[in-house]
Image (cartoon, grey):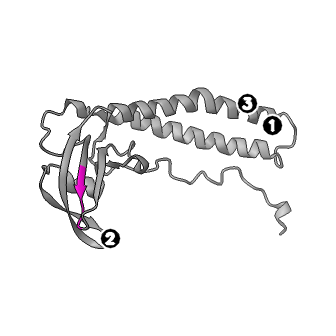
Amino acid sequence: MSKAFTKETETEDEDLPEEAEALPRGVKNYITPAGLQRLRDELKHLRVEERPKVVEVVSWAAGNGDRSENGDYIYGKKRLREIDRRMRFLIKRIEIAEVVDPARQTNHEQVFFGATVTYADSNDTERTIRIVGVDEARSEHNEVSWISPIARALLKSSEGDTVEVRTPNGREPIEVLEISYSGA
């Protein structure tokens, strides 16, 4: 049968998972105040700016007649599903978020959630990372999730401690050089 006589559905991506990264069972969704604000800002942007623009384009495209070959309509409906899926995800994550302010940390001698840690690996290469929530980790800003292997190895360590990190190449020792906390 020719493709011309088959019905194409608009729900090709309906079987995609709604959540980008699930939290492990029984784990709280810790987040910094700044991270929570970024999630709220993204939700507001999608709800107030992006979604209304796409709805307008879809409405205009629907008024042009034949929707089966209307690229603006088909793409717009797909984009609306993506926006709605992301909004549902953000709402769920904001609802279960447990805010932890690193600036209120009283024990500055150990690594806990929200710490900025400078460490040296086995090649004496120094790196600085910040331990944040699952939903706010950004590698381009050297922010890692508190459930990542590096963060789990560093948690509860002190300056001068050597801990082992599981890597794809096996265990690697790293030395904690500096620990600091800030609210940003």
Location of the N terminus (image quadrant): bottom right
Q: Residue at x 24, y 50 (%)?
A: 118
Inspect the image, locate mark 2, and give the three-letter code of the amino acid beneath it. Answer: Pro
Give the secondary structure at mark 1.
Answer: helix
Q: Which residue is mark 1?
A: 61
Q: Which mark identifies residue 56? A: 3
Give the secondary structure at mark 2.
Answer: loop
Quadrant of the rendered image containing residue 166: bottom left
Q: Which residue is at the front of the view, 39 or 169?
A: 169
Dot 2 or dot 1: first in sequence order is: 1
State the predominant SS element of the stretch in magenta: strand
In reply to whether residue 14 is colored magenta, the answer given is no
Inspect the image, locate mark 3, and give the three-letter code of the amino acid beneath it. Answer: Glu
Give the residues in magenta: 118-122
In reply to whether residue 121 is colored magenta, the answer given is yes
Q: Residue at x 14, y 45 (%)?
A: 110
| Mark 1 to mark 3 CA distance (whole Å) | 9 Å
Dot 2: within a 10 Å radius of its alpha carbon, few (fewer than 14), some, or many (20 or more) residues? few
Q: Is residue 95 visible?
A: no
Q: Which residue is at the front of the view, 118 or 167?
A: 118
Q: Which mark identifies residue 168? A: 2
Dot 1 or dot 3: first in sequence order is: 3
Q: Residue at x 52, y 36 (%)?
A: 87
Badge 3 vs badge 2, beta-carbon distance below 8 Å: no
In percent of width and height, residue 177 lies at: 18, 52
In the figure, 4 relative to 184: above or below? Answer: below
| Mark 3 to mark 2 CA distance (whole Å) | 48 Å
What is the residue that sits farthest to the top in this orientation? 48
Mark 3 vs mark 2: in front: 2
